[in-house]
Amino acid sequence: MKIGTRILAGYGAALIVFAIVSVVSYRATSELVQSTSAAAHTYQVRQNLSNILTSLTDAETGQRGYLLTGREDYLDPYNSGTRTVDQYVQEVRMLTSDNPRQQTRIGALQPLIAEKLSLLAQAIQLRRQQKDKAALDVVMTDRGRQTMMDIRRIVTDMDNEENSILAARTQRANQTASFASQTIVAGALASVVLIALIALLIQRSIVGPLVSFMELARRVGEGDLTQQTKINRTDELGELGGHLDQMVTGLKEVAKQSSLVAENLSAATVEILASTQQQAAGTAEQAAAVQQANATMAELSQSGAQVAERAKQVVTAAEAVSSSSASGLQAVRDTNRTMEGIREQAEAVAENVIRLSEKTQAVGDIISSVNDIAEQSHLLALNASIQAAAAGEHGRSFSVVANEMKNLAAQSKQATVQVRSILGEIQKGINTSVMLTEEAVKRADSGRQQSQVADRTIRQLADNLEESIRAFQQIVAGSGQQQIGFEQVTQAFRNIGIASQETANSTKQSEKAVANLSALAQQLRGLVGRYRV
Amino acid sequence: MSDRDLRDWDAVRRRLEDAEKALSNTGTPTREEMDRVFRKRAEELARPLSLLAESRNESILVFRAGGVRFGMPLTHIAEVVSNPKIAKVPGAPSEIAGLIQVRGDVRPVWNLPALLGLNTQDAAPSQTGQILLLRHAAQEIGILADSIENTAQYDSEKIRQSPGNLPGTLITDDFVTVLDVKTLFARFQGSTTI
């Protein structure tokens, strides 16, 4: 449970006790007030009851006086008594309206009073009429006295009733008051005990840990970072202890790091010192190197002039190459045109060869008809031979001619066969020629393409050459600027010499600064050494 | 390289010229050729008749029919007709190939292999070819031949009776079956009358 919650719970308990005590006191007080007012009420009722009796007595007294004296002035008490008695009766009825027993008694009282008053009035009336005897008889009947006794009895009952009510109320009020006083005493005691308990609780749960925290803080202040709070709680103080532990751990880390830093700083200072000394040595070497560089610059300047001369020569040579590449380009273009011509002629050759082939076909047709003629001739010769044979001896010479004709026809037929085979060979030759011509056309075409490639190549070459010429011209122009540049560089080296002198001076200052830094590192190490980790 | 090319082209031109010359010379026979032809003809004509009679040679026409070479004496042949239209006769026996028309006259055509009872490779006789018109006893009859080869001479002394029942003789030199027209006609008459 958190401390805040605990304190709140303690005060809450005290408050509850206080509230109980207050409620009880209030109730007792209001009871007392009520019973006091009830007592007053009772006294008022009793006063009125006694007033009723007094008024009736007054009225009787006045009646008696008048009866005795007959003088009207003796009737004054009677008049005032009859006048006030009704008023007192009404008041009692009103005051006891919450008590039904008293109301019935009043109900019984009222006719008795009326009877008494009417008897009195009767006696007075008779006396006034000078009938003294009758009046006295009225008194002597004893009814008046009896009525009066009844009235007194009822009034006494009512008085007793009121008295007993008052006594009961008073007793209850006394009981309440005693309970209230007991409660107040017990509440006060409980409050005291509770507050004492809370105080003890606060002391135990807050002050104890605070003291140990204080001890820890004192030790940390002295430089002891080895301590921890050793508190294992879940409340605010537990959290505070955890934060304190973290703080101590952090401080420990800082101290360790600082110590490390101080040592590193020392080492670094030593290194800086060493490097500063090296720098001093380096500055001296630099001065020597600048001297050498100056000499080298002079040589460079000389060789730059030579480069410019060479570049001029190269430009002249390149211009010659450029003009010859132009003529090469022209030659390649001529080649291209010639190739185109070769291609066209080869195509014409192919056309001619094809026409020859067609002619061969015509020759073939002619050979066919010759063959036909030969066959017909053969048949004719055959029939002629037959006719010659039929003619017998006379047809002998004719048979010889017919035989010759037959032989000729056979020879013609053979010749046509030969011609046909030769024509076949010619056709083959023509086919080969066409194929060769096609190949030639293709070669001419590829030659043309190659010459176009050559054209492009030479043009590129010419472009490259022009670029080279421009580049070399720029070199020639640039070498003049180079000379100026070399002089500027020489000047720069002189400036470097001055600067290295200045560097030597500042290196001495650096050495001093490093010595200061070393002292500071020593101080830091001393400071960090205070902490035990 | 260009020199060699030029030389080659010269050779080509020369060859072309030669070819042209040769072409223009053909068509007109040389004098020697003509002399040779004339001499041969004169020798042929000058041969004495007795020599011819002694030789007892007879001219025949050699032709092919049904894959067999036949010979027919020229004296029995009236004419050779090339590729006539052969009209088939419905209901005719297989020996008769059909009818042909020669200068207005109608002649029957025999199917020679069927007539001789040969086992020919093609059962149906070819409907085209040359037709030999045979003449015998005032009758003219055609024989269908696949092709006509030539005329030839044969010595009648060297003829033997052919084997089997073929009506003819065999020349030993080049195996030509020379047909006897008389036997052939008789056979035809027999086969058709049966």
Image (cartoon, rainbow, N blue to C red):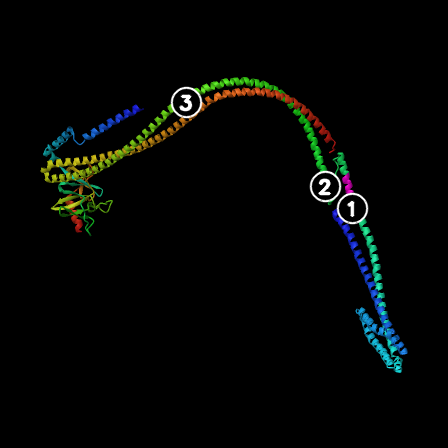
Identify the residue position indicated by label 3 in the image.
A318
Chain on which label 1 sits = A
Mark 1 Cα shell of 10 Å, populated few (<14), some (14-19), many (≥20): some
Residue drawn 39% across the image and 27% down it: A458
Chain on which label 2 sits = A
Going by the numbered disc 1, the residue's amino acid type is Ile
Horizontal and vertical percent for residue A247? 71, 38
Task: Answer with mark 1 or mark 3, whichever residue precedes in sequence.
Answer: 1
Q: Main secondary structure of the magenta part?
A: helix
Residue A361 lies in quadrant: top left
Residue B17 falls left or right of residue A312: left
Distance CA(mark 2)–CA(mark 3): 89 Å
Residue A461 falls left or right of residue A39: left
Q: Is residue A246 above or below residue A162?
A: above
Going by the numbered disc 2, the residue's amino acid type is Gly
Viewer-side residue, B52 vs A528: A528
SS at mark 2? helix
Distance CA(mark 1)–CA(mark 3): 108 Å
Range drawn in magenta: A205-214
Q: Is residue B119 above or below residue A286?
A: below
Task: Answer with mark 2 or mark 3, whichever residue precedes in sequence.
Answer: 2
Marker count (numbered): 3
Q: Is residue A305 above or below residue B57?
A: above
Mark 3 Cα shell of 10 Å, populated few (<14), some (14-19), many (≥20): some
Residue B135 falls left or right of residue A319: left
Residue A313 falls left or right of residue A39: left
Badge number at residue A404 = none
Viewer-side residue, A186 vs A435: A186
Chain on which label 3 sits = A
For discs 2 and 3, the disc positioned in front in the rendered view: 3
Q: Residue furthest left?
A: A394
Same chain under badges 1 and 3? The reply is yes
